[in-house]
Amino acid sequence: MLLRNAPWRITALLLSFGVFVSTARAEVSEVSVGRLGGLSDVILIGRAVRTTRVPVKSAPESDLRFTEATLASVEPLQWIKGDPRPGLLWVWAEAIWMDDISRAVEGERCLFFLQASGVADLVEPESLGPLAEATSGQPIHRIAHSGHGRMVLSTVAGEDYATLRTSTIMLPSWLDTIPGPVPGPWRTTRSVRVADLVAYVRARVVDVPKASDVDGLDVEGRLRALDGDWTLFGEALDSFWSIDDEALGELRRILRDPASPLREAAALALRRVRDPGLKLILEDLHSEDVVVRRGAAFAAE
């Protein structure tokens, strides 16, 4: 079954590579929810109380030009990370580039992953005065990962669910998700039970790990980081961008072993390898060795 469907799977893979290259400026990179938490200064469940339009001038380097920006005052309902403090938080809710989805809707409850700095870089210096006046001098937080750190909450069968784009925010495989229920333009719009996600974030969120945390690991060690340690996911995946022939051979060996618990991680890693990765998958699909062909077909799924 895998071999019979392999040609169209490879075609789809090639097309997806082409689309990514042709729209590279409009793509937000993948990030695990653990790493997203590590990058965030504040994580909380909050309600957008009010949105305010403030006259500003976008910075020259901004991809999108704007003369007004939306700020949202957010009422904290549950603190998960950061020092709790009374009063409302101010959140920047304006997109600054093509794939930025930063926004806010009055009355909406969300799980917010927020960063405490960076707004001054988004506008011309003369715009800082109107922003400070609108917030009475309070700091303005940015929604992490170009707005993807805002996960709208909804109630399903009496339980709260947070909606996110799973092709951008990666969850551990054992966290169950449901389709929707908040409509979205992507097939990967899914929702996860808030209680489960918050428990995971509380247990796993740590400071963003240094790249050296994976530098000393062998291929299997880095694959285990991909497969299990979600706080190291980004560094582990990036470490496969450029690897030597010996490491490539190890990835292919694991792919050919149906019993290997690291097979899925190896398939993901091989697709990450610069230049040789896709070429090797294509070559192995035409191998006379059925085991090699099956490994390549698995990587192409």
Image (tube, helix red, strand yellow):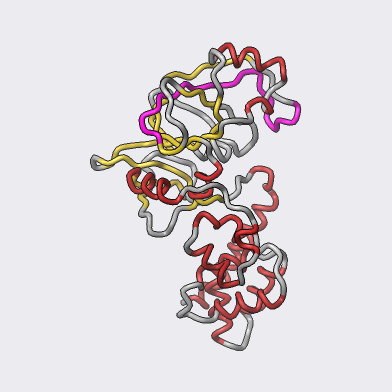
Front in this rendered view, residue 10 or 132: 132
Vertical placement of residue 234 versus 128, above or below: below
Residue 69 is at least partly visible in this image:
yes
Percent of width and height locating residue 203: 41, 50
Residue 290 x %, y %: 55, 86
Relative placement, left or right, of 253 versus 160 is right
- Residue shown at the point (34%, 42%) measured from the top left: 161
The residue sitting at the left extreme is: 158
Where residue 266 appears, as percent x and y from the top left, is 56, 70
Farthest-out residue, right: 60
The quarter of the picture where residue 222 lies is: bottom right
What is the total number of numbered labels drawn onto the structure image? Answer: 0
User: Is 63 colored magenta in this rendering?
Assistant: yes
Closer to the camera, 209 or 279?
A: 209
> In the rendered image, which quarter is residue 183 located in?
top left
For the question of whether residue 267 can be seen, the reply is no
Check residue 67 for magenta coloring. Answer: yes
Q: Nearer the viewer, residue 235 or 252?
A: 235
The secondary structure that dominates the magenta segment is strand
Residue plotted at (30% across, 38% down): 155
Specify start and end residues of the magenta stretch as a single range: 60-79
Q: Nearer the viewer, residue 137 or 33?
A: 137
